[in-house]
Amino acid sequence: MSSAPANAPLRPIGVLGGTFDPIHYGHLRLAEEAREALALERVLFIPAGDPPHRPAPGTPAAHRLGMVRCALRGHAAFRADDLELRRGGKSYTVTTLETLRRRYGPHRPLVLILGADAFFGLPSWHQWQRLFELAHLLVAMRPDFPPPWGSEPPEDDPPEPGAGLPPALQEVLAVRRAPKLAHLAETPAGLVGFFRNTPLAISATSIRRLLHEGRSARYLLPEAVLRYIATHSLYQGDSLIP
């Protein structure tokens, strides 16, 4: 069995958090496109225990983790990670990244995968500026979301920070924007990259509502997740909508 050379570069690890209530193809496609864009060694799906910026999930943590495991079965590069559920308390991203940095060491690139809406709200996060000490940020820009650089840049021209961003983020991008996505694989942390992902108009709220109303949610999430939901009679109570 051959092994990688001792001086071989460490491939990045992607980190995708969320309530996953339930996990659906929007989450999976985002992770797949991020994996492909950066040649990520793996993507960690980390269900939130007690998210600080939204109401606590209505579905028990064990079931949300179970659905994630069902969705990822058979995908070698995707892993479910229950570190926030085991830790308890508020699920602060900075604390999660501190744990991952200790796990993977100081040299492995860590890449936090975010949607554009989450990125725009970053200054409200707990100790948000410390995130850059621990990981890179990879921001998925939907075609229907206004770009932070004011206008669509040429395909090979990196975007410039624009007036659409909060001032704190403009300052961050002025010094941390990655000219090329490949730069996120060359250092352990500290950069922000943007990429366009395929828009999938799927939301966990709409899926919960469909299931609550007894309607089909097929082709919005994996069949294995639908079977898990049916087996455990999830999303049948009024308290789970939205």
Image (spheres, helix red, strand yellow):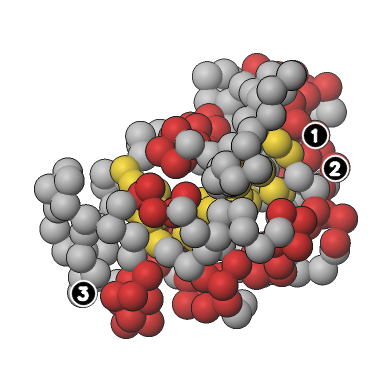
Image x and y of residue 156, in percent: 17, 46
Q: Is residue 240 visible?
A: yes
Q: Which of these two is toward me, 23 or 136?
A: 136
> Label 2, label 3: how many angstroms apart (C-alpha)?
42 Å
CA neighbours of label 2 inside 10 A, class few (<14), some (14 to 19), many (20+): few
Q: Which of these two is toward me, 1 or 96?
A: 1
Disc 2 and disc 3 in contact, CB within 8 angstroms: no
In the displayed structure, would residue 153 be above or below residue 51? above
Image x and y of residue 204, in percent: 57, 41
In the displayed structure, would residue 226 be above or below residue 151? above
Image x and y of residue 163, in percent: 21, 74
User: Which residue: 26% across, 64% down?
Assistant: 148
> Label 1, label 2: how many angstroms apart (C-alpha)?
6 Å
Give the residue number, with chain letter if any, for mark 1.
66
Give the residue number, with chain letter if any, for mark 2.
62
Q: Earlier in the sequence, mark 2 or mark 3?
A: 2
Give the amino acid at mark 1.
Answer: Gly
CA neighbours of label 1 inside 10 A, class few (<14), some (14 to 19), many (20+): some
In the displayed structure, would residue 168 be above or below residue 85? below
Give the amino acid at mark 3.
Answer: Ala
User: Which corner quadrant holds the N terminus?
Assistant: top right
Q: Which mark is residue 163?
A: 3
Give the amino acid at mark 2.
Answer: Ala
Disc 1 and disc 2 in contact, CB within 8 angstroms: yes
For label 1, the SS is: helix
Query: Does residue 89 appear to the left or right of 169 in the view shown?
Result: right
> Label 3, label 1: how many angstroms apart (C-alpha)?
42 Å
Q: Which of these two is toward me, 142 or 168?
A: 168
In the displayed structure, would residue 60 be above or below residue 4? below
CA neighbours of label 3 inside 10 A, class few (<14), some (14 to 19), many (20+): few
Image x and y of residue 167, in percent: 32, 82
